[in-house]
Structure formats: C-alpha cells, structure tokens
Amino acid sequence: MDFFADIFLGAGALAAAFYCLILSRKLSKLKALDQDLGGAIAVMSQQVDQMTKVLGEAQNTASSSSSNLETMTQRAESVAGKLEVLISALHDLSDEEDAGQIAEEVVDADENDEDVEDTTPESEDVTVFLRNPLRGAGGR
C-alpha cells in the first residue's frame, strides 16, 4: 500500500510541475504582451504629440494666409473702384486726348497710391457702375 501511495504522490508532484510549467509560459506571454502594449501606447503618444505640433503649424499658416488674402482682397476692391471710375470717365468723354489724360492720371495716382481727381464733365445722363462692397465675389 505504501508503494501505491508513493506512486500517487509522485504522479501528483509531476502533475503540479507540469501545471507550473504551463503557468510559467502563460505568464511570460502575458508579460511580453504587456511590454508590447506599453510600447504601442508610447509610440501612439509620440505620434499624438507630433500631430498636435503639425496642427498648430497648420493653423498658423492658415491664419497668415487668411490675413494675406484679406489684404489682397482689399487692394483688389480699391483697384476695382478706380477702374469703375476710369470706365465711367472714359464712357463720358468724347475726346481721345481727354481719355488719355484721365488714364494717365489714374495710372500715376495708382503708382503714387493717391486718390484720382474727378475730371469728368457734369452731365445728367451719366451711366455709373458701382459695386456693393458688402456683397462678396460671385454675387452672393
């Protein structure tokens, strides 16, 4: 009977050793998974920081482009107003010399960035083209 008890005791010890071996392998896989997961989280955190920096730079660039576009739009509106005055003045003139003189004044004033003196003759039947500054491009 002692012999059978020793065999069962040895078999139990072997089963416990086998269980410990399996448990050890599972724990090492879990540890490797934890390290891989930690590395993945660190990489993602670094990528988020980089994307935040890129987004800030993109916002600064967009702001600068917006201000440049606004300046150019204001300049274009100013030039459009001068062209409208020039067109209406040229429309009313019958002499080519007067038209050339006004065109030269507008060009000179544009180069000097001054207002053009209105030398158009007074008439009751004058067609004037005006643009509404509150309306944007495209006739909205």
Image (tube, rainbow, N blue to C red):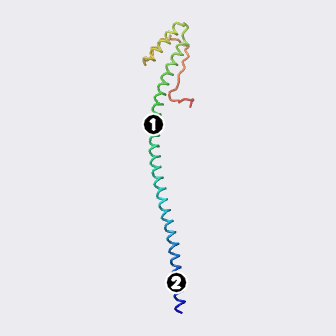
The image shows residue 65 at horizontal and vertical percentages of 47, 33
10 Å crowding of disc 1: few (<14), some (14-19), many (20+): few
When the figure is inspected, residue 117 is found, relative to residue 72, above or below; the finding is above
Q: Which residue does the image show at 45% across and 28% down from the upper left? A: 71
User: Which residue bears the numbered disc 1?
Assistant: 63
Q: Quadrant of the N terminus?
A: bottom right
The image shows residue 104 at horizontal and vertical percentages of 48, 12
Q: Which residue does the image show at 52% across and 89% down from the upper left? A: 5
Answer with mark 2 or mark 1, whichever residue precedes in sequence.
2
Local secondary structure at mark 2: helix
User: Which residue bears the numbered disc 2?
Assistant: 10
Nearer the camera: disc 2 or disc 1: 2
The image shows residue 113 at horizontal and vertical percentages of 43, 19
When the figure is inspected, residue 76 is found, relative to residue 46, above or below; the finding is above
Q: Which residue does the image show at 54% across and 12% down from the upper left? A: 90
Amino acid type of the residue tagged 2 in the rendering: Gly
Q: Which residue does the image show at 53% across and 90% down from the upper left? A: 3
Disc ID at residue 5 = none
